[in-house]
Protein backbone atom coordinates (compact mmCIF):
# COMPACT_ATOMS: atom_id res chain seq x y z
CA UNK A 1 0.00 0.00 0.00
CA UNK A 2 2.72 2.44 1.02
CA UNK A 3 4.64 1.46 -2.10
CA UNK A 4 1.57 2.24 -4.15
CA UNK A 5 1.24 5.69 -2.65
CA UNK A 6 4.89 6.43 -3.29
CA UNK A 7 4.50 5.35 -6.87
CA UNK A 8 1.44 7.55 -7.25
CA UNK A 9 3.38 10.49 -5.86
CA UNK A 10 6.28 9.90 -8.22
CA UNK A 11 3.96 9.61 -11.18
CA UNK A 12 2.13 12.81 -10.33
CA UNK A 13 5.45 14.63 -9.88
CA UNK A 14 6.45 13.35 -13.28
CA UNK A 15 3.21 14.64 -14.74
CA UNK A 16 3.79 17.99 -13.01
CA UNK A 17 7.15 18.53 -14.64
CA UNK A 18 5.61 17.46 -17.94
CA UNK A 19 2.68 19.79 -17.72
CA UNK A 20 4.12 22.77 -19.58
CA UNK A 21 6.32 23.51 -22.49
CA UNK A 22 9.51 25.16 -21.25
CA UNK A 23 9.32 28.95 -21.17
CA UNK A 24 12.02 31.04 -22.77
CA UNK A 25 12.71 34.71 -23.32
CA UNK A 26 13.21 35.80 -26.95
CA UNK A 27 16.92 36.27 -26.12
CA UNK A 28 17.21 32.73 -24.80
CA UNK A 29 15.52 31.37 -27.88
CA UNK A 30 17.78 33.37 -30.14
CA UNK A 31 20.81 32.04 -28.31
CA UNK A 32 19.60 28.45 -28.54
CA UNK A 33 19.15 28.85 -32.28
CA UNK A 34 22.29 30.88 -32.96
CA UNK A 35 24.39 28.11 -34.53
CA UNK A 36 21.58 27.46 -36.98
CA UNK A 37 20.93 31.10 -37.80
CA UNK A 38 24.63 31.55 -38.48
CA UNK A 39 24.89 28.35 -40.53
CA UNK A 40 22.30 29.41 -43.14
CA UNK A 41 22.84 26.39 -45.37
CA UNK A 42 21.97 22.75 -44.71
CA UNK A 43 21.36 19.50 -46.54
CA UNK A 44 18.04 17.68 -46.51
CA UNK A 45 18.21 13.98 -47.32
CA UNK A 46 15.18 11.96 -48.38
CA UNK A 47 16.10 8.32 -48.45
CA UNK A 48 13.81 5.38 -48.07
CA UNK A 49 12.16 2.53 -49.94
CA UNK A 50 10.78 5.03 -52.48
CA UNK A 51 14.29 5.27 -53.91
CA UNK A 52 13.62 1.92 -55.60
CA UNK A 53 10.54 2.83 -57.67
CA UNK A 54 12.38 6.16 -58.25
CA UNK A 55 9.22 8.07 -59.04
CA UNK A 56 8.59 10.36 -56.06
CA UNK A 57 8.49 9.64 -52.34
CA UNK A 58 4.70 9.87 -52.54
CA UNK A 59 4.53 7.01 -55.05
CA UNK A 60 2.61 4.80 -52.62
CA UNK A 61 -0.03 7.49 -52.37
CA UNK A 62 -0.07 8.52 -56.03
CA UNK A 63 -0.42 4.97 -57.30
CA UNK A 64 -2.61 3.91 -54.38
CA UNK A 65 -0.34 1.00 -53.54
CA UNK A 66 -1.16 -1.34 -50.69
CA UNK A 67 1.38 -2.62 -48.17
CA UNK A 68 1.47 -5.85 -50.16
CA UNK A 69 2.17 -3.99 -53.44
CA UNK A 70 4.96 -2.08 -51.72
CA UNK A 71 6.61 -5.09 -50.12
CA UNK A 72 8.92 -5.69 -53.10
CA UNK A 73 10.75 -2.45 -52.32
CA UNK A 74 11.41 -3.58 -48.77
CA UNK A 75 12.57 -7.01 -49.94
CA UNK A 76 14.97 -5.48 -52.45
CA UNK A 77 16.35 -2.54 -50.50
CA UNK A 78 20.08 -3.16 -50.73
CA UNK A 79 22.19 0.02 -50.61
CA UNK A 80 25.47 -1.73 -51.28
CA UNK A 81 27.29 1.49 -52.20
CA UNK A 82 26.17 3.47 -49.16
CA UNK A 83 29.09 5.45 -47.78
CA UNK A 84 27.85 8.19 -45.45
CA UNK A 85 31.38 9.60 -45.12
CA UNK A 86 31.26 10.35 -48.82
CA UNK A 87 27.88 12.06 -48.38
CA UNK A 88 29.13 14.10 -45.46
CA UNK A 89 32.20 15.21 -47.37
CA UNK A 90 30.05 16.35 -50.28
CA UNK A 91 27.74 18.29 -47.98
CA UNK A 92 30.66 19.96 -46.30
CA UNK A 93 32.40 20.79 -49.56
CA UNK A 94 29.19 22.42 -50.80
CA UNK A 95 29.34 24.73 -47.79
CA UNK A 96 26.54 23.12 -45.80
CA UNK A 97 26.82 23.21 -42.02
CA UNK A 98 24.07 20.81 -40.99
CA UNK A 99 22.05 17.95 -42.39
CA UNK A 100 18.59 16.54 -41.78
CA UNK A 101 17.72 12.99 -42.84
CA UNK A 102 14.42 11.13 -43.13
CA UNK A 103 14.56 8.60 -40.31
CA UNK A 104 11.06 7.59 -41.43
CA UNK A 105 9.00 9.05 -44.25
CA UNK A 106 5.25 8.77 -44.92
CA UNK A 107 5.70 5.22 -46.23
CA UNK A 108 6.52 4.23 -42.63
CA UNK A 109 9.86 2.55 -43.32
CA UNK A 110 12.55 3.26 -40.70
CA UNK A 111 16.23 3.68 -41.52
CA UNK A 112 16.99 3.07 -37.87
CA UNK A 113 16.81 0.09 -35.58
CA UNK A 114 13.56 0.57 -33.68
CA UNK A 115 12.27 -1.75 -31.02
CA UNK A 116 8.73 -0.93 -32.00
CA UNK A 117 8.58 -2.14 -35.59
CA UNK A 118 9.90 -4.77 -37.95
CA UNK A 119 9.54 -2.37 -40.85
CA UNK A 120 13.13 -1.15 -40.65
CA UNK A 121 16.47 -1.26 -42.44
CA UNK A 122 17.98 -4.00 -40.25
CA UNK A 123 15.34 -6.39 -41.63
CA UNK A 124 16.08 -5.63 -45.28
CA UNK A 125 19.13 -6.84 -47.21
CA UNK A 126 20.85 -3.71 -45.77
CA UNK A 127 20.84 -5.67 -42.53
CA UNK A 128 21.84 -2.84 -40.18
CA UNK A 129 20.96 0.50 -38.59
CA UNK A 130 21.78 2.92 -41.41
CA UNK A 131 21.00 5.97 -39.33
CA UNK A 132 23.70 5.17 -36.84
CA UNK A 133 26.38 5.13 -39.55
CA UNK A 134 24.98 8.29 -41.04
CA UNK A 135 25.03 10.18 -37.76
CA UNK A 136 28.59 9.16 -37.01
CA UNK A 137 29.83 10.09 -40.47
CA UNK A 138 28.20 13.52 -40.52
CA UNK A 139 29.37 14.34 -37.04
CA UNK A 140 32.89 13.32 -37.98
CA UNK A 141 32.84 16.00 -40.70
CA UNK A 142 31.77 18.62 -38.18
CA UNK A 143 28.19 18.88 -39.42
CA UNK A 144 25.28 19.20 -37.04
CA UNK A 145 22.77 16.38 -37.41
CA UNK A 146 19.02 16.64 -37.55
CA UNK A 147 16.22 14.09 -37.89
CA UNK A 148 13.18 14.32 -40.12
CA UNK A 149 10.41 12.09 -38.80
CA UNK A 150 7.10 11.65 -40.57
CA UNK A 151 4.06 12.04 -38.36
CA UNK A 152 2.17 10.40 -41.19
CA UNK A 153 2.52 6.64 -41.54
CA UNK A 154 1.01 4.70 -44.44
CA UNK A 155 2.19 1.38 -43.09
CA UNK A 156 1.19 1.32 -39.43
CA UNK A 157 -2.02 -0.71 -38.90
CA UNK A 158 -3.49 1.77 -36.38
CA UNK A 159 -2.92 4.88 -38.46
CA UNK A 160 -6.40 5.73 -39.68
CA UNK A 161 -7.08 6.08 -43.40
CA UNK A 162 -7.41 9.80 -44.25
CA UNK A 163 -7.38 12.14 -47.24
CA UNK A 164 -3.64 11.73 -47.76
CA UNK A 165 -3.59 7.97 -47.42
CA UNK A 166 -2.96 5.65 -50.38
CA UNK A 167 -6.20 3.83 -49.50
CA UNK A 168 -8.29 7.01 -49.21
CA UNK A 169 -11.97 6.74 -50.09
CA UNK A 170 -14.85 9.00 -51.03
CA UNK A 171 -17.47 8.93 -48.33
CA UNK A 172 -17.81 9.05 -44.54
CA UNK A 173 -19.36 5.61 -44.57
CA UNK A 174 -16.40 4.14 -46.43
CA UNK A 175 -13.94 5.82 -44.04
CA UNK A 176 -15.89 4.47 -41.07
CA UNK A 177 -15.79 1.01 -42.49
CA UNK A 178 -12.07 1.05 -43.26
CA UNK A 179 -11.08 2.62 -39.95
CA UNK A 180 -13.09 0.27 -37.79
CA UNK A 181 -10.76 -1.24 -35.21
CA UNK A 182 -7.91 1.19 -35.91
CA UNK A 183 -6.80 3.05 -32.82
CA UNK A 184 -4.93 6.32 -33.16
CA UNK A 185 -4.07 6.15 -29.44
CA UNK A 186 -1.93 3.14 -30.21
CA UNK A 187 -0.31 5.02 -33.06
CA UNK A 188 0.31 8.04 -30.78
CA UNK A 189 2.24 5.80 -28.44
CA UNK A 190 4.21 4.42 -31.39
CA UNK A 191 5.12 7.96 -32.45
CA UNK A 192 6.25 8.85 -28.99
CA UNK A 193 8.22 5.66 -28.50
CA UNK A 194 10.06 6.04 -31.77
CA UNK A 195 10.89 9.69 -31.24
CA UNK A 196 12.10 8.77 -27.77
CA UNK A 197 14.40 6.19 -29.35
CA UNK A 198 15.68 8.71 -31.87
CA UNK A 199 16.41 11.30 -29.22
CA UNK A 200 17.97 8.82 -26.81
CA UNK A 201 20.07 6.45 -28.86
CA UNK A 202 21.99 8.76 -31.20
CA UNK A 203 23.66 11.34 -28.99
CA UNK A 204 23.01 15.03 -29.49
CA UNK A 205 20.37 15.70 -32.13
CA UNK A 206 20.41 19.34 -33.15
CA UNK A 207 17.17 19.50 -35.06
CA UNK A 208 13.87 17.67 -35.31
CA UNK A 209 11.85 18.05 -38.47
CA UNK A 210 8.34 16.65 -37.98
CA UNK A 211 6.11 16.31 -41.04
CA UNK A 212 3.18 17.20 -41.26
CA UNK A 213 -0.31 18.23 -40.10
CA UNK A 214 -3.44 18.70 -42.20
CA UNK A 215 -6.27 19.28 -39.73
CA UNK A 216 -9.86 19.09 -40.87
CA UNK A 217 -12.29 16.45 -41.97
CA UNK A 218 -10.50 13.17 -42.58
CA UNK A 219 -7.25 15.01 -41.90
CA UNK A 220 -4.89 15.01 -38.94
CA UNK A 221 -3.64 17.62 -36.50
CA UNK A 222 -2.35 18.16 -32.99
CA UNK A 223 -5.03 16.05 -31.35
CA UNK A 224 -4.14 13.08 -33.49
CA UNK A 225 -0.43 13.36 -32.72
CA UNK A 226 -0.90 14.49 -29.12
CA UNK A 227 1.47 17.22 -30.23
CA UNK A 228 1.90 19.10 -26.98
CA UNK A 229 2.90 16.09 -24.95
CA UNK A 230 5.09 14.87 -27.75
CA UNK A 231 6.91 18.19 -27.86
CA UNK A 232 7.28 18.30 -24.09
CA UNK A 233 9.00 14.95 -24.26
CA UNK A 234 11.25 16.17 -27.09
CA UNK A 235 12.30 19.28 -25.16
CA UNK A 236 12.98 17.23 -22.09
CA UNK A 237 15.14 14.68 -23.89
CA UNK A 238 17.09 17.25 -25.92
CA UNK A 239 16.74 20.73 -24.40
CA UNK A 240 18.87 22.39 -27.07
CA UNK A 241 17.02 20.91 -30.04
CA UNK A 242 15.46 23.09 -32.75
CA UNK A 243 11.98 21.99 -33.88
CA UNK A 244 10.04 22.98 -37.00
CA UNK A 245 6.44 24.15 -37.14
CA UNK A 246 4.44 21.24 -38.53
CA UNK A 247 2.99 19.81 -35.31
CA UNK A 248 -0.10 22.00 -35.66
CA UNK A 249 0.93 24.05 -32.62
CA UNK A 250 1.22 27.38 -34.40
CA UNK A 251 -0.80 29.15 -31.69
CA UNK A 252 0.86 27.52 -28.71
CA UNK A 253 3.68 29.37 -26.99
CA UNK A 254 6.87 27.37 -27.47
CA UNK A 255 5.07 25.11 -29.95
CA UNK A 256 7.63 25.64 -32.72
CA UNK A 257 10.97 27.29 -33.35
CA UNK A 258 10.99 28.17 -37.02
CA UNK A 259 8.67 28.22 -40.01
CA UNK A 260 9.17 26.14 -43.15
CA UNK A 261 8.16 27.63 -46.51
CA UNK A 262 8.43 24.68 -48.87
CA UNK A 263 9.43 24.97 -52.52
CA UNK A 264 8.78 28.69 -52.93
CA UNK A 265 10.63 31.96 -52.46
CA UNK A 266 9.12 34.13 -49.74
CA UNK A 267 8.21 37.68 -50.77
CA UNK A 268 9.67 39.05 -47.54
CA UNK A 269 10.95 37.91 -44.14
CA UNK A 270 7.99 35.90 -42.72
CA UNK A 271 6.25 37.38 -39.67
CA UNK A 272 3.87 36.17 -36.97
CA UNK A 273 1.75 38.88 -35.33
CA UNK A 274 3.96 41.53 -36.87
CA UNK A 275 7.20 40.02 -35.57
CA UNK A 276 9.86 38.54 -37.84
CA UNK A 277 10.30 34.83 -37.15
CA UNK A 278 13.13 32.38 -37.83
CA UNK A 279 12.60 30.55 -41.09
CA UNK A 280 14.10 27.95 -43.36
CA UNK A 281 12.97 27.19 -46.87
CA UNK A 282 13.31 23.59 -47.98
CA UNK A 283 13.91 23.07 -51.67
CA UNK A 284 14.63 20.29 -54.12
CA UNK A 285 17.04 20.21 -57.04
CA UNK A 286 14.16 19.10 -59.22
CA UNK A 287 10.56 18.51 -58.13
CA UNK A 288 10.75 15.37 -56.05
CA UNK A 289 12.34 14.83 -52.63
CA UNK A 290 13.01 11.15 -53.08
CA UNK A 291 15.25 9.97 -55.93
CA UNK A 292 13.33 10.37 -59.21
CA UNK A 293 15.13 8.79 -62.13
CA UNK A 294 13.14 10.32 -64.99
CA UNK A 295 12.70 13.86 -63.73
CA UNK A 296 14.48 16.42 -65.88
CA UNK A 297 13.48 19.73 -64.34
CA UNK A 298 16.73 20.24 -62.43
CA UNK A 299 17.65 23.76 -61.36
CA UNK A 300 21.03 25.02 -62.51
CA UNK A 301 23.85 26.26 -60.29
CA UNK A 302 22.95 29.90 -60.67
CA UNK A 303 19.33 29.30 -59.67
CA UNK A 304 20.44 27.29 -56.66
CA UNK A 305 22.92 29.92 -55.52
CA UNK A 306 20.26 32.55 -55.97
CA UNK A 307 17.94 30.54 -53.74
CA UNK A 308 20.59 30.50 -51.04
CA UNK A 309 21.54 34.17 -51.30
CA UNK A 310 17.93 35.26 -51.59
CA UNK A 311 17.05 33.34 -48.41
CA UNK A 312 19.86 34.95 -46.45
CA UNK A 313 18.92 38.35 -47.89
CA UNK A 314 15.55 37.94 -46.15
CA UNK A 315 16.96 36.55 -42.92
CA UNK A 316 16.39 32.86 -43.63
CA UNK A 317 18.08 29.50 -44.18
CA UNK A 318 18.12 27.11 -47.11
CA UNK A 319 17.73 23.37 -46.60
CA UNK A 320 18.58 21.87 -49.98
CA UNK A 321 17.53 18.32 -50.65
CA UNK A 322 19.33 15.33 -52.09
CA UNK A 323 17.49 12.10 -52.85
CA UNK A 324 20.09 9.32 -52.88
CA UNK A 325 19.57 6.27 -55.10
CA UNK A 326 18.63 2.86 -53.75
CA UNK A 327 22.26 1.80 -54.12
CA UNK A 328 23.07 4.52 -51.61
CA UNK A 329 24.74 7.21 -53.71
CA UNK A 330 24.07 10.79 -54.78
CA UNK A 331 23.51 10.65 -58.51
CA UNK A 332 25.67 12.59 -60.97
CA UNK A 333 23.20 15.48 -61.28
CA UNK A 334 23.19 16.09 -57.55
CA UNK A 335 26.93 15.69 -57.25
CA UNK A 336 27.77 18.16 -59.96
CA UNK A 337 25.44 20.80 -58.51
CA UNK A 338 26.81 20.37 -55.02
CA UNK A 339 30.29 20.68 -56.42
CA UNK A 340 29.63 23.90 -58.26
CA UNK A 341 27.85 25.43 -55.28
CA UNK A 342 30.89 24.51 -53.23
CA UNK A 343 33.13 26.24 -55.74
CA UNK A 344 31.21 29.45 -55.20
CA UNK A 345 30.99 29.01 -51.44
CA UNK A 346 34.72 28.48 -51.12
CA UNK A 347 35.33 32.09 -52.08
CA UNK A 348 32.07 33.76 -51.15
CA UNK A 349 30.70 32.11 -48.00
CA UNK A 350 31.54 35.24 -46.03
CA UNK A 351 28.41 36.79 -47.54
CA UNK A 352 26.34 33.84 -46.26
CA UNK A 353 27.48 32.61 -42.83
CA UNK A 354 26.43 34.86 -39.98
CA UNK A 355 24.65 37.15 -42.45
CA UNK A 356 21.09 38.38 -42.63
CA UNK A 357 18.84 40.97 -44.24
CA UNK A 358 20.56 44.34 -44.73
CA UNK A 359 19.32 47.31 -42.69
CA UNK A 360 16.71 49.39 -44.54
CA UNK A 361 19.06 52.34 -44.97
CA UNK A 362 20.91 50.40 -47.70
CA UNK A 363 18.78 50.38 -50.80
CA UNK A 364 19.04 47.51 -53.21
CA UNK A 365 20.53 48.34 -56.63
CA UNK A 366 18.79 46.71 -59.64
CA UNK A 367 19.47 43.00 -60.27
CA UNK A 368 21.18 42.56 -56.94
CA UNK A 369 20.70 40.79 -53.66
CA UNK A 370 22.06 42.27 -50.45
CA UNK A 371 23.20 40.48 -47.34
CA UNK A 372 24.70 41.96 -44.21
CA UNK A 373 26.86 40.74 -41.39
CA UNK A 374 25.76 42.55 -38.22
CA UNK A 375 28.92 41.54 -36.33
CA UNK A 376 31.50 42.75 -38.85
CA UNK A 377 29.11 45.39 -40.22
CA UNK A 378 29.94 44.49 -43.80
CA UNK A 379 27.48 44.68 -46.62
CA UNK A 380 27.49 42.24 -49.54
CA UNK A 381 26.20 43.12 -52.98
CA UNK A 382 25.51 40.04 -55.12
CA UNK A 383 25.58 40.84 -58.82
CA UNK A 384 22.99 38.60 -60.47
CA UNK A 385 23.39 40.35 -63.77
CA UNK A 386 26.91 41.64 -64.25
CA UNK A 387 26.87 45.37 -65.09
CA UNK A 388 29.04 47.19 -67.56
CA UNK A 389 31.72 49.06 -65.66
CA UNK A 390 29.76 51.77 -63.91
CA UNK A 391 27.76 50.50 -61.02
CA UNK A 392 25.72 52.88 -58.92
CA UNK A 393 25.02 52.44 -55.25
CA UNK A 394 22.02 54.74 -54.78
CA UNK A 395 22.17 56.88 -51.67
CA UNK A 396 25.40 55.33 -50.37
CA UNK A 397 27.38 58.57 -50.23
CA UNK A 398 29.28 58.76 -46.95
CA UNK A 399 28.48 55.17 -46.01
CA UNK A 400 31.26 53.18 -47.63
CA UNK A 401 34.89 53.16 -46.59
CA UNK A 402 36.26 50.54 -48.95
CA UNK A 403 34.98 48.19 -51.65
CA UNK A 404 36.41 44.93 -52.93
CA UNK A 405 35.44 41.78 -54.77
CA UNK A 406 34.90 39.12 -52.17
CA UNK A 407 36.31 36.21 -54.18
CA UNK A 408 39.80 37.63 -54.64
CA UNK A 409 39.93 40.60 -52.30
CA UNK A 410 40.73 42.97 -55.15
CA UNK A 411 39.94 46.65 -54.74
CA UNK A 412 37.00 48.18 -56.54
CA UNK A 413 37.48 51.90 -57.03
CA UNK A 414 34.87 54.21 -55.65
CA UNK A 415 34.11 57.46 -57.42
CA UNK A 416 31.64 60.19 -56.73
CA UNK A 417 29.19 61.51 -59.27
CA UNK A 418 29.93 65.19 -58.74
CA UNK A 419 33.35 64.74 -60.29
CA UNK A 420 34.19 62.45 -63.14
CA UNK A 421 30.81 60.88 -63.81
CA UNK A 422 28.72 63.67 -65.18
CA UNK A 423 26.67 61.47 -67.49
CA UNK A 424 26.18 58.29 -65.49
CA UNK A 425 22.74 59.29 -64.32
CA UNK A 426 23.95 59.32 -60.75
CA UNK A 427 22.24 61.63 -58.36
CA UNK A 428 23.53 63.57 -55.43
CA UNK A 429 24.12 61.10 -52.61
CA UNK A 430 24.92 58.18 -54.90
CA UNK A 431 28.33 56.65 -55.26
CA UNK A 432 29.78 54.86 -58.20
CA UNK A 433 31.88 51.72 -58.36
CA UNK A 434 34.22 51.11 -61.31
CA UNK A 435 33.98 47.44 -62.15
CA UNK A 436 36.24 45.65 -64.61
CA UNK A 437 34.59 45.13 -68.00
CA UNK A 438 35.36 41.45 -67.86
CA UNK A 439 33.06 39.58 -65.50
CA UNK A 440 35.15 37.67 -62.95
CA UNK A 441 34.98 33.92 -63.44
CA UNK A 442 32.49 33.52 -60.60
CA UNK A 443 28.87 32.44 -61.10
CA UNK A 444 27.52 35.34 -59.04
CA UNK A 445 30.24 37.91 -58.19
CA UNK A 446 29.99 39.55 -54.79
CA UNK A 447 31.13 43.03 -53.79
CA UNK A 448 32.10 43.39 -50.17
CA UNK A 449 31.54 46.86 -48.77
CA UNK A 450 33.38 47.89 -45.66
CA UNK A 451 31.13 50.48 -44.14
CA UNK A 452 31.88 53.65 -42.25
C1 LIG B 1 6.05 17.58 -47.76
C2 LIG B 1 5.98 16.21 -48.34
C3 LIG B 1 7.17 15.42 -48.19
C4 LIG B 1 8.47 16.11 -48.00
C5 LIG B 1 8.34 17.39 -47.21
C6 LIG B 1 9.60 18.18 -47.18
O1 LIG B 1 5.42 17.75 -46.58
O2 LIG B 1 4.91 15.49 -47.87
O3 LIG B 1 7.25 14.43 -49.12
O4 LIG B 1 9.23 15.28 -47.24
O5 LIG B 1 7.32 18.13 -47.67
O6 LIG B 1 9.39 19.44 -46.69
Image (tube, grey):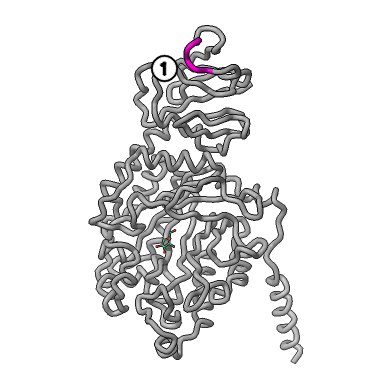
| Front position in the image: 399 or 312 | 399
Q: Is residue 68 left or right of residue 245?
A: left
118 versus 141 height, above or below: below
Classify mark 1: residues with Cα within 10 Å, few (<14), some (14-19) or many (20+): some
Q: Residue at x 48, y 34 (%)?
A: 369
Q: Is residue 34 left or right of residue 298?
A: right
Q: Quadrant of the C terminus?
A: top right
Q: Secondary structure at mark 1?
A: loop
Q: Determine the quadrant in which ligand 1 lies.
A: bottom left
Residue 259, quarter of picture: bottom right
Q: Residue at x 40, y 16 (%)?
A: 436
1 versus 112 height, above or below: below
Q: Provide the residue designation for mark 1.
A: 389
| Front position in the image: 256 or 72 | 256
Point out residue 194 in the picture as x, y percentages from the top left corner: 49, 71
Residue 47, quarter of picture: bottom left
| Front position in the image: 99 or 131 | 99
Question: What residue range appears in magenta?
Answer: 422-426
Amino acid sequence: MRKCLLLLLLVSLGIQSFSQLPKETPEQKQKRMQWWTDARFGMFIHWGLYSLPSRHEWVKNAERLTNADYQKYFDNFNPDLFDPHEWAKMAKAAGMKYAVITTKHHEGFCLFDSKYTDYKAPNTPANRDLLKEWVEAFRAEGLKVGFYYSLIDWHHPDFTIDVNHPQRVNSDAEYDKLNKGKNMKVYQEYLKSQIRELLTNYGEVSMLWLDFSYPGKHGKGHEDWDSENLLKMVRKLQPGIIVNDRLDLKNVEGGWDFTTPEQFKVAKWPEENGVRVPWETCQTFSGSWGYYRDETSWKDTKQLLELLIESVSKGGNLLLNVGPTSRGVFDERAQSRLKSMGKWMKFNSRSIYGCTQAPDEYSKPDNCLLTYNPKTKRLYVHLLDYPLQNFTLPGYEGKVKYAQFLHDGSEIKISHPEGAWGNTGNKQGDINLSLPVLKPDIEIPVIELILN
